[in-house]
Amino acid sequence: MVYLEYIKNAFKSQMYYRMNWGMKIMGIILSIFLQLCLWNVLADDHSDIVSMSYMVEYILLGCMVKSLTASNVVDLVNGHIGSGQIAMDMIKPIRFQLYMFCESLGNGLFSCLFEYFPIVVIFSIFMKSFGLWGRIDIFFLASTFLGLCLYFVLAYCLALTGFWWTQTWILGRFLNDLVGLFSGKMVPVWMFPEALLAVSRCLPFQHMYYTPISMVLEDFTLMQKCSLLGVQLFWCLFFLFLGKVIERRGMYRLQVQGG
Amino acid sequence: MEEKGEEILNRTVIRVENLGKDYQIRKRTERFWKDIFSRQYEVKKAVEDVNFEIAEGEIVGYIGPNGAGKSTTIKMLTGILQPDRGQVFVNGIQPGKCRVDNAKNIGVVFGQRTQLWWDIPVKDTLHLMKHMYHIPEQTYQENLKLYSDILGLGEFMHLPVRQLSLGQRMRADIACAILHNPQILYLDEPTIGLDIFVKENVRGFIHEINQKKRTTVILTTHDMSDIEKLCSRVMVIDQGRIIYDGSLLDLREQYGHMESIEAKGVWDDVFLEEIKRLPSVSVTQEENQIMIQYDSRKVDSDKILFLLMKNQRICDIKVHEQSLDGIIKQLYVCKEVRENGIFRVY
């Protein structure tokens, strides 16, 4: 219950900055528009490889998945560690990791519902892809949630290095670059060259982004869908465990000086 | 607050044994390339061999100069920091190992930080606390009303925290810390930066909570009037070690022997020389006003007053006890006290 309250409060906090909200909306519209223009040109030249209707759905679904991971977890967690605000988190009877997850989820939900969702709906009407919404099922929702969890636990592990290095924003940036390259955020994973595809399969990144989208856009059997969810769950548990180990060691290194 | 002198001897709620904590500080040299390839650290003992027990219902002042180790001790008591040496037991729980369990029974205010949610109204953070500590609705409403009345929360309850003044924020922080009726309240400089009215308000509130709910309070502050008005027991820490642990009364008796007499009148040199000849007496003169400082163990104030009264041209006279600030200052610099070890009376 308390964690639900945290999500609500994070959600409310976002509502106080209307100017930010307006600017983000503009940015999202421009980003979708730019991607559609680029893929339109590519689809025209290579219609045998990619169809425009597929890419429209890919971009719009991708926006919804991306919106939930809009919160920069590394900056969020590292901000608490670096500023000493973690001291105020530790005096409460809550788990630090869960608290950070709820704050991140609250920010993501706000972004999803009030920033991305209305724009994606409008674009789906204009691009005649409204049928997309009918194909969204429980597998997409479960996979999106696991993708969000995976992004969080991985970013949390990196952010915890702040116990040793204090400033880890560069790691956050590095993570975003890796996610951008391997997750399918820019280009669907199946378009990768063989070598990149092989590397990508060994890494967790595509399960943050491409796997949820593929639940809707690819013709998977029930078994395939379940096994993909299993892989996502495996990566989540792996980084959750790793995070616990780092957190336990890091707490011994915590220094909160100056009152 | 007259009852503050009463000795409250109850069950021990906090037990600290040989507590120690080190901080690693990076040593930088003049040659930056050397820093890149070989990093050197020095170890600063923030807290060393600290031992004490605190009983239920006590209000203990934990004081010391900047960097003495006050906040570090509090952070180990609350479970924020892990001790490097020794043990801490709070209600039988080791906070470093069972942080969440310990957090359910304590309230903490760090004067320089806030636990309020920055962008949303105070009432929303209080509501969050209700869920966090599983406070029953009736208790929540009762406490909210009580604290609103005493701390005047009503006037800013609906404002986002970023729009509050420091005094308002501090009052809201205190309300948050005790909304769940904690057994122990840690206050780390709760009156820092507050005006005299808010300070009075906060002190009165802490006293009332202690009296009504028997809350154990550990207060760190640089404001000695906080200590004088609230605490029956004082612990003084310096350079990570406890240098005094006892009652405020004993502290005054043991170290508050430097008194002063301020007098206005017309003074001649012969008369001032006569006073200066008394043991441990020093005299400073500024126009028609003199300040006589003396060690009350070595010379009686009566003797000085008698000499002053002999002077027919005196028009005003005031006798000052040594202030608590002065006593503490003396304690910080007094080497003999440290050499004699911890002075413990309680």
Image (cartoon, coloured by chain):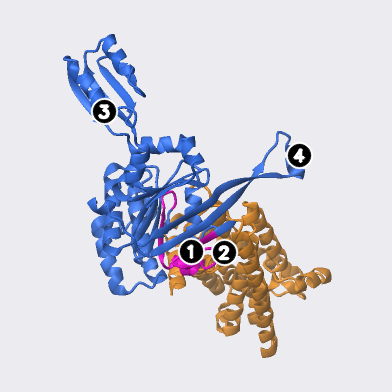
Residue A2: image x %, image y %? Answer: 44, 71
Could one spot residue A79 in this view of the protein?
no
Q: CA distance from mark 2 to mark 1?
A: 42 Å
Q: Residues within 10 Å of mark 3 (few under 14, many from 20)?
A: some
Amino acid type at image mark 4: Lys
Residue at horizontal 19 percent and vertical 17 percent from the top: B310
Q: Name the disc covering residue B89, or none.
A: 1
In the rendered structure, the colour chosen for chain A is orange
Q: CA distance from mark 1 to mark 3?
A: 47 Å
Locate residue A53 relative to residue B253 in the image: left or right: right
Q: Which residue is mark 4?
A: B34
Asked if badge 3 and badge 4 are on a common chain, one would say yes
Label 4 element class = helix
Q: In the image as oriented, which residue stretches furthest toward the right? A: A195
* Tint applied to chain B in the drawing: blue
Please check whether the numbered discs 2 and 1 fall on a single chain: no
Relative to B222, B25 lies left or right = right
Mark sitting on residue B301? 3
Q: Is residue B142 visible?
A: yes
> Residue B108 location in percent, x, y?
41, 58
The residue sitting at 83% across, 69% down in the picture is: A195
